[in-house]
Image: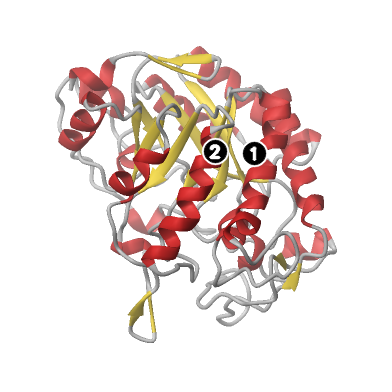
Amino acid sequence: MSALFTPLKLGSVTIQNRIGMSALTRNRSSDTVPNEIMQKYYVQRAAGGIGLIVSEGVLITRQGTEWPQAPGIWDKSQVAAWKTIIDAVHEAGSKIYCQLWHLGRVSHPQAPEQIAAGVPVYAPSAISARGGKFRFLPGSPGYVTPTELPDPTVIIAQFKQAAVNAKEAGFDGVELHGANGYLVHQFLDSTSNKRTDKWGGSIENRARFALETLKVLIEVYGPDVAIKLSPAGGYNDMGMPLEETIETYGYLLREVEKLGLSYVALVRYSDVQNPEYDGVKRSTKHDVVATFRPFLTKTPIFVNAGVTLAEADEMVSNGIAGVFFGFNSIVHPDLGKRIQNGKALDNVPNIQLFYGHPDVDPAIGYVDYPEAVY
């Protein structure tokens, strides 16, 4: 595993190793404000030897998310709470990016935060996603037909303000969430974006929202801006035919290459992230890394989704910048130390509490996983 334990310069900062913790929704904030139990969670993993932590998805504005207790970064109380966490993460020896998140059409108008926002559920087009699960609403509501976003630049401005707030809080950089069927992904995909203005139709127009958002983030953070993409992901009712997928993401990545991002995170194909609708898988399985790596000759690439330790070491040895671990970061607070010291990744996951439960202590299944004996 020697390749994984070499320092790496990303943008303006240097991380101690090539092991990253991917963004992981955990539903432990106090309403939308980060809290002490979240600080303990992040500090455990920073002290446990992870080089780069990406925060859970952080909401840039009030939205009716299906994930209750997801944190935000649109007001001063949230910024102050994040600053406490970030200072502690830095003291523990790690760097941390803020993943900026807008859900778009997979919000719900009856969710408390959407009601408080006083705006409709916005999306590129008035096309609902199949599926959906809002456990905190009566019954079993799925996704609704959203309202077409009149002026996408309004949301781009919200992303920029979120980056300003993230910088005030002390985050080392920001990662734009462009994966998993959320707003940026919805603009990219021709099945969810049927606009006829400059934000839809052609590949260049569908990629515009992602690229214009990255540009305003760079205005705030300079080289410390990244994006996460899932070209083979069908989660939240996404997915185009393979040829169109390659053409769309190929164009996007060629343009991204010009921007000087700190990294691009590519999410590999996963059956879990590719649900069936009417007996048909939503996206087309393909080798994401092999397909899209040639488009990024200068921009560092991180790989995510089911990467084994052997694969991780081989990837980094062959020029991939780093690897993000999700599941193993949840259940092993000392993940980096375990890998470096050859300890087994043998903690038993408490999957039922990955996302918490209103009647259970939030620490359980969150910060109670044991460290190895060294």
Pair 1/2: label in front: 2
First-in-chain label (1 vs 2): 1
SS of the residue under disc 1: helix
Quarter assignment of residue 233:
bottom left
Q: Looking at the picture, does residue 176 appear above or below residue 103?
A: above
Quarter assignment of residue 30:
top right
Q: CA distance from mark 1 to mark 2?
A: 9 Å
| Residue found at x 43% / y 39% | 265
The amino acid marked with disc number 1 is: Leu
Horizontally, is 241 left or right of 180 in the view?
left
- Please tell me which residue lies in front, 271 or 193: 193
* Residue 114 makes an appearance in the image: yes
Q: Looking at the picture, does residue 132 appear above or below residue 255?
A: below
| Residue found at x 68% / y 36% | 215
Residue position for label 1 = 214
Please rate how many residues cluster around mark 2, counting C-alpha atoms within 10 Å: few if below 14, some from 14 to 19, many from 20. many
Rendering colour mode:
secondary structure
The amino acid marked with disc number 2 is: Val
Horizontally, is 215 left or right of 13 in the view?
right
SS of the residue under disc 2: helix
Could you tell me residue 112's position as x and y percent? 73, 64
Could you tell me residue 77's position as x and y percent? 77, 35
Is the Cβ of the residue at disc 1 closer than 8 Å to that at disc 2? Answer: yes
- Please tell me which residue lies in front, 341 or 240: 240
| Residue found at x 40% / y 69% | 241
Q: Which mark is residue 100?
A: none
Could you tell me residue 282's position as x and y percent? 40, 72
Residue position for label 2 = 256
